[in-house]
Amino acid sequence: MRTPVFILVQIAIAAALYFSLRAIGNDYLFFLGYTVLQFVVLATAWNILGGYCGYVNFGSSGFFAIGVYTSVFLYTVGQSLDDLFPASIAGPLHAIFPLPVPVDVVFGGIVAGLVGLGTGYLTLRLRGVFFAIATLALAIVLQTFVVNWSFVGGSRGAYIIPPDKVPVFGPYIEFLFALMLALVIIALTTARLIERSRLGVGFATIRDDELAAEACGVPTLKLKLIATVLSGALMGMAGAPFPFYIGYVEPGSAFDLSYAVNSIAMPMIGGTTSWVGPMIGALLLGTLQQIATVTISSAVNLLIVGLLLIGFVIVAPNGIVGLWQGWMRKRSRA
Amino acid sequence: MSAPLLQVSQLGKRFGGFVALDGVDLQVAPGERVGLIGPNGSGKSTLVNCICGTLHNETGSVTFAGETVDGMVAHERTRRGLARSFQLPRPFTSMTVADNIRVPLLYTVAFRVGHHVTEAEADERCMELLKLVALDGKAAKNPRDLTQVEMRKLELARAMAADPKLLIADESMAGLSHSEVEDIVALLIRLNESGITIIMIEHLMRAVMAFSQRLVVLVSGKKIADGKPDDVIKEREVIGAYLGQ
């Protein structure tokens, strides 16, 4: 399927999903759907570095939180224009602020992408567990920074008051859901484009054998930096609408370890070698977690993730996509 | 000797207190077939790694095709025409045999010709190379399904896909049977006759003598002999290094 057709198919599915939920008329489904879609973006973003290149990033919560706090920062700036700037500058700025959430998403992506670039330069000469620990440390450093930054709320957190309704969409959550659908389309299209390009071949060689990749002329450091920037930017974009979704943000919720665990577990369960895998993993795990939250308790969320991850590592180390491919191979041989 | 394709001058490399290379000089002329031998730990692989950019030399310099390549990383050297095969085959196991060959075509040849290699061009060159090493029937297989000798051939074909001026074959025959060794030697000679300069690192003296026009011997990080194979193997120092004084 050519990329424009792929995008059109995604838009059609997204529109069908949006209007179906709207027809049901229960806002809670939009809340639930938003979280699941957010995990699709996070898992797809993680997979660009972790799945395609084989570099396990434990700092997803850090990149997600960069997006969250970019939005909080821009929102707070908008609220404090008169305090921050002289009247001659604050006046025209009032016409721009508060910034629309899609603009926050763009800024969140840019900031997280730049942090990804910096992190890449500092850590991409490390491999395996050393790289994973370095990314985990990044999330902790960022959290410490935010805890001590009072402008964005510090440890006491920050309140974000979104408007009740948005033109065209109606309730704000429907707008955020539609925005997250758009981010899913961007993330999946990016991942699929990478997979089918020269870049994807280069990423696969890095995952298989970095030394051999260099010997074949693959500029491994450059490609890893591209992967870190893309992955970080998409995670930041996933985080940017979060303050408007939740209304109150504090470092504990923005840097929650469950984002890191989920963004690793979902591609592992779905399959890391294709764009389909993280999406399947995120839809499956995300939906299961939401059902568990409603029917049992939100405390069992990570238990479900852990049990499924153990099960898949033992039974299907290549995830659901790997299982499917293995089954298809057997069928074609028979 | 014509202007050297590869010139290694006073190359030095240490690993902590261990001197792996101690002021090694080496010149290789275009079109030559050079054998590089030495006992285990003599510095052969370190020398190859320093020439190819996998390791960086601490002293001395490496000049390739008239350009000093010190400080360049491995892929930059490959793009300039300096290719290698590995002692233990390192195929990309998530790809087919054919896709393994495509990697250097996409990343090295495309860089050199200044435009992307088209699918058709890549397929054509890929099959040419696979035919050359008699792996054309296994193009769609995973490298894990290949035999040891086929894996070695894939390693050589992938190095060849980078369209190199100089190919360094690092112990391409280790663990192979008599006929398989002959097969690989014949292949390397064919590649050389097509205009590629080759340095062969090998323990198998039969293969080295059959292949080399010139023989270089390393012992304890130093070059102790360099000359015609028949003369070199008679040198007392070489006999001493291999058989013990």
Image (spheres, coloured by chain):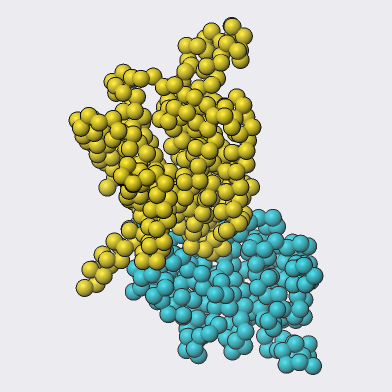
Chain colours: A yellow, B cyan
Q: How many marks?
A: 0
Give the residue displayed 52% in from the left and 23% down from the top: A74
User: Is B103 placed left or right of A179 in the picture?
Assistant: right
Left or right? Give the position of A145 relative to A72.
Answer: right
Residue drawn at (24%, 36%), measured in percent from left and top?
A: A17
Residue A81 in percent (x, y) is at: 56, 14
Q: Quadrant of the N terminus of chain B?
A: bottom right
Left or right of B100? Residue A283 is left
Residue at the image point whose x is 70% and y is 79% from the top: B41
Q: Is residue B106 above or below residue B138?
A: above
Whether residue B93 can be seen here: yes
Give A170 or B177, whichever is nearer the viewer: A170
Name the quadrant of the C terminus of chain B.
Answer: bottom right
Q: Nearer the viewer, residue A279 or A21?
A: A21
User: Which residue is nearer to you in this view: B10 or A142?
Assistant: A142
Tell me residue A228's x, y (percent). Answer: 52, 46
Could one spot residue A112 in this view of the protein?
no
- Name the residue furthest front: A296
Q: Position of residue A249 (x, y in %)?
A: 50, 31
Residue at x 46% of width, y 44% of height: A259
* Residue B200 higher or lower than B242, as above or below: above
- Estimate the x, y position of residue B38 in percent, counting from the top left: 69, 82
